[in-house]
């Protein structure tokens, strides 16, 4: 017997309306009485926020590139615990994933198709109906037969122009034997505001995000056959659920093994409520993170305290600081106005506080961002840039730090439109080669601070989290 039944929401291409359909489907199925587990394929941080609003539980990511294909099913079982149905929103087009010139198979690494195959879940294809007529049958035939490992279970027509248009499209679907599970009219008013990195995160959009999710839910409930979608879902393949406590324990054991290169700082202690306080930045400026990160830190024994750098002070007793990604460029003035926090971060960093900063966190630690004074921990200035930097990276740690060992190889992801206008004079954190083969150096190591543009997934790198916890425990033992 398999796990919680799942259905994957995919599309022929980006911009087809997957997020609207997936979010509305999650909300509508929840209203119908289901306990829905929401997932997103790939390293996206924004869509899961809307999924979480619709589901009433955290949205999670399934990314074979960042966590390894072997962890996708365990992470699915972990995230779906206590639910009776799961909705997995895909990324880009169904077969789009990491671009690899040497890949010869039909399924790209990190693609929706790969994740659907790993889970054994059927795919519902969302088609933007604008401009389509009878030729839709040929498109659907291609997607249904391109890879025998992917089962196309039905179609949802989106942005249908008229009743006649709907009839023609339904006939095209019937020609290839695919049921139409729903047909949605054009509703431009439902578009959620976006900016340079995509949709505005739900936490920033506040009440308007909740209203948008409610509208998506109402639209899908009115135009999609929810019972048919639920009946289409199939139990995910068997597997043991990912366990953050076990992941930390295994990481500690591997670090302590002979020949591991460990410096002995990782401990197996589980102090529970008396463990070190690890502060994690949240709020509108720091919205990019994975639920598993906090779960791993807690499993290691940390007391995780989420705070908002726009208005809060550093939590009392902070022994480690996590500054995740987000949109600090949209809140630079307000971040700069919280001078007590900036001073505290600068002082504690100088005293050896372990800090794990990714993307937005790196910007927060620079001297300035778009002319606004930041913490000044990293010897660089940053600004909003002219173009987007986006893609997976095969990186190597260039030196020992509170998280990584020199020479460790990590798969990460860049997603930003800012840049350092004065290169950091501090030691770089990561190195890799770009698509043209040129050497890239990223980030900065300053004392126990690890700051870079590279996003990593903690579930794929539990040893780094365990080491960071150990560094925080060491810092907590010394009076400051």
Image (cartoon, rainbow, N blue to C red):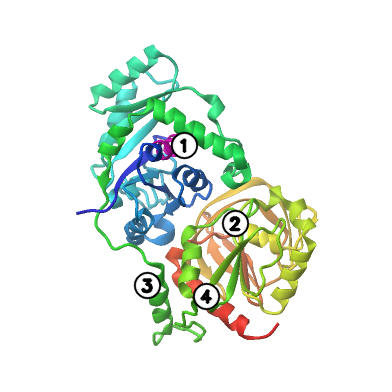
- Depth check: give the residue in front, 389 or 361: 361
Mark 1–mark 3 Cα distance, whole angstroms, equals: 37 Å
The reply to whether the C-beta atoms of the residues labelled 1 and 4 are less than 8 Å apart is: no
Label 4, on which residue?
273
Label 3, on which residue?
246
Left or right: 480, with 12 as reference point: right
Is the N terminus in the top left, top right, bottom left or bottom right quadrant?
Answer: bottom left
Label 1, on which residue?
14
Q: Secondary structure at mark 1?
A: loop
Q: Secondary structure at mark 3?
A: helix
Mark 2–mark 4 Cα distance, whole angstroms, equals: 27 Å
Label 2, on which residue?
325
Mark 3–mark 2 Cα distance, whole angstroms, equals: 27 Å
Mark toward the viewer: 2 or 4:
4
Say which label, 1 or 4, has the lower sequence index: 1
The reply to whether the C-beta atoms of the residues labelled 4 and 3 are less than 8 Å apart is: no
Q: Secondary structure at mark 2?
A: loop
On the question of residue 401 being in view, the answer is no
> Residue 354: x and y, percent?
62, 74
Magenta span contains residue 26 = yes
Determine whether 316 is above or below 358 in the image: below
Q: Secondary structure at mark 4?
A: helix
> Residue 73: x and y, percent?
32, 57
Say which label, 1 or 3, has the lower sequence index: 1
Toward which corner of the image does residue 318 lie, by quadrant? bottom right
Left or right: 301, with 236 as reference point: right
The reply to whether the C-beta atoms of the residues labelled 3 and 2 are less than 8 Å apart is: no
Say which label, 1 or 2, has the lower sequence index: 1
Give the residue at the far left of this rendering. Answer: 1
Mark 1–mark 4 Cα distance, whole angstroms, equals: 45 Å
Q: Residues within 10 Å of mark 3 (few under 14, many from 20)?
A: some
């Amino acid at each position: 017997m398999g796990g919680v039944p799942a259905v994957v929401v995919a599309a022929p291409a980006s911009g087809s309306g997957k997020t609207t359909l997936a979010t509305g489907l999650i909300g509508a199925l929840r209203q119908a009485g289901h306990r829905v587990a929401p997932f997103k394929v790939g390293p996206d941080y924004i869509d899961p926020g809307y999924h979480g609003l619709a589901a009433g539980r955290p949205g999670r990511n399934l990314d074979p590139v960042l966590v390894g294909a072997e962890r996708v099913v365990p992470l699915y079982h972990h995230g779906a615990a206590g639910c009776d149905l799961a909705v997995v929103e895909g990324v880009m087009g169904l077969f789009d994933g990491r671009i690899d010139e040497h890949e010869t198979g039909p399924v790209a690494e990190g693609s929706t198709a790969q994740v659907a195959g790993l889970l054994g879940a059927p795919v519902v294809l969302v088609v933007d109906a604008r401009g389509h007529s009878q030729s839709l049958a040929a498109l659907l035939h291609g997607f249904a037969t391109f890879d025998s490992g992917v089962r196309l279970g039905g179609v949802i027509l989106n942005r249908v122009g008229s009743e006649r248009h709907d009839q023609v499209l339904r006939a095209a679907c019937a020609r290839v034997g695919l049921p139409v599970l729903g047909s949605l009219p054009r509703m431009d008013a439902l578009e959620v505001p976006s900016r340079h990195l995509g949709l505005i995160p739900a936490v920033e959009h506040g009440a308007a995000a909740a209203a948008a999710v409610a509208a998506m839910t109402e639209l899908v409930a009115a135009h999609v056959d929810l019972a048919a979608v639920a009946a289409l879902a199939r139990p995910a393949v068997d597997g043991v659920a990912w366990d953050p406590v076990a992941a930390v324990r295994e990481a500690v054991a591997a670090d302590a093994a002979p020949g591991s290169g460990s410096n002995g700082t990782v401990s197996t202690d589980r102090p529970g409520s008396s463990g070190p306080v690890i502060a994690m930045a949240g709020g509108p400026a720091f919205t990019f993170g994975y639920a598993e990160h906090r779960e791993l830190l807690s499993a290691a024994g940390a007391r995780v305290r989420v705070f908002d750098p726009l208005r809060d002070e550093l939590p009392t007793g902070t022994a480690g600081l996590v500054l995740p990604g987000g949109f600090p460029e949209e809140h630079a003035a307000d971040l700069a106005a919280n001078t007590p926090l900036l001073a505290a971060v600068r002082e504690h960093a100088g005293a050896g506080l372990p800090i794990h900063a990714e993307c937005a966190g790196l910007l927060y630690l620079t001297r300035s961002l778009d002319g606004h004074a930041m913490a000044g921990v990293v010897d660089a200035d940053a600004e909003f840039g002219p173009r987007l930097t986006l893609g997976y990276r095969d990186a190597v740690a260039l030196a020992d730090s509170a998280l990584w060992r020199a020479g460790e190889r990590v798969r990460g992801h860049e997603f930003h439109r800012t840049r350092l206008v004065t290169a950091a004079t501090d030691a770089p954190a990561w190195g890799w080669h770009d698509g043209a083969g040129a050497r890239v150096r990223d980030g900065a190591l300053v004392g126990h601070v690890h700051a870079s543009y590279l996003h990593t997934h903690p579930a794929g790198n539990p040893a780094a989290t365990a080491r960071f916890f150990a560094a925080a425990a060491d810092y907590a033992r010394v009076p400051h």
